[in-house]
Amino acid sequence: MGLYEPTNEYRDFNITVSAGNGGEDLLKKYIERKGFQIINRANDPIYRTKDIDFEFSRNGKKWHSVEVKSDYRIAQTGNIVVEVAMYRKSGKTPGWLYYCEADYLCFIDMQSYKFYFFDWKKLQQLVLNGHWRFTKFNNGTDNCEGEVCKIPLKDLANLGLIVVEDRIYFG
């Protein structure tokens, strides 16, 4: 099992955000070790509406934004999941597919600490154009229903959409 464990308790948006912070922290440390500067945007209300966790740059030249998704089942399923819509107690809300404005999307497998960077704009266009189908599901953990797009990592590799694939090592 990984360092950050999922729970079977009811989660709302704030609890879900808190659970994702572990992955964000791991990735920030990894990127800083590679010599990049980081600006944390996770608590900035403007960047939160754009679903951007932080920005990074080497030598302050060109800044890139990233959204981090912590996932506990990538190794099991071989998929990443893009949120299309959620039907919570507060009503239907569009998933981050529609409002994420990050340059890069990073999924971290919180069991193996392997991560995958994707060019978000290219991936987003493929999803919106129907390259993969949407699936409805009942999310017992969050006590809601939702709609997602399950995307096999194998497809992403074959399409050349994985920009970086690596593992976070501790020590």
Image (cartoon, rainbow, N blue to C red):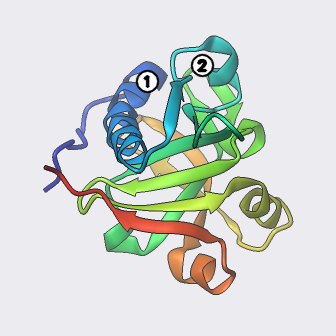
Q: Which residue is mark 2?
A: 90
Q: Nearer the viewer, residue 25 or 129?
A: 25
Seen from this angle, which residue lies furthest front? 59
Q: Compared to 6, does 44 lie above or below?
A: above
Circle 2: element type: loop
Across and down, in percent, residue 166 comes to: 39, 66
Counting every numbered tag in the picture gives: 2
Q: Compared to 52, does 82 lie above or below?
A: below
Q: Nearer the viewer, residue 156 or 15?
A: 156
Mark 1 closeness class: few <14, some 14–19, many ≥20 residues within 10 Å: some
Q: Identify the residue shown where x is 48% and y is 24%.
A: 13
The quadrant of the rendering that contains the N terminus is bottom left
Seen from this angle, which residue lies furthest right? 129
Q: Nearer the viewer, residue 79 or 140?
A: 79
Residue 95 appears anywhere in the view: no
Q: Earlier in the sequence, mark 1 or mark 2?
A: 1
Seen from this angle, which residue lies furthest bottom? 158
Dot label at residue 12: 1
Instruction: Please state which of the two labelled residues, at mark 1 or mark 2, is closer to the viewer.
Output: 1
Q: Identify the residue shown where x is 20% and y is 43%.
A: 5
Q: Position of 168 compared to 47: left or right?
A: left
Q: Identify the residue shown where x is 66% and y is 79%.
A: 160
Q: Position of 78 compared to 29: left or right?
A: right
Q: Identify the residue shown where x is 54% and y is 59%.
A: 117
Across and down, in percent, residue 91 comes to: 65, 24
Across and down, in percent, residue 119 comes to: 69, 59
Across and down, in percent, residue 69 comes to: 47, 46
Q: Nearer the viewer, residue 45 or 145?
A: 45
Q: Compared to 79, does 168 lie above or below?
A: above
Q: Amino acid at mark 2?
A: Ser
Q: Amino acid at mark 1?
A: Asp
Dot label at residue 167: none
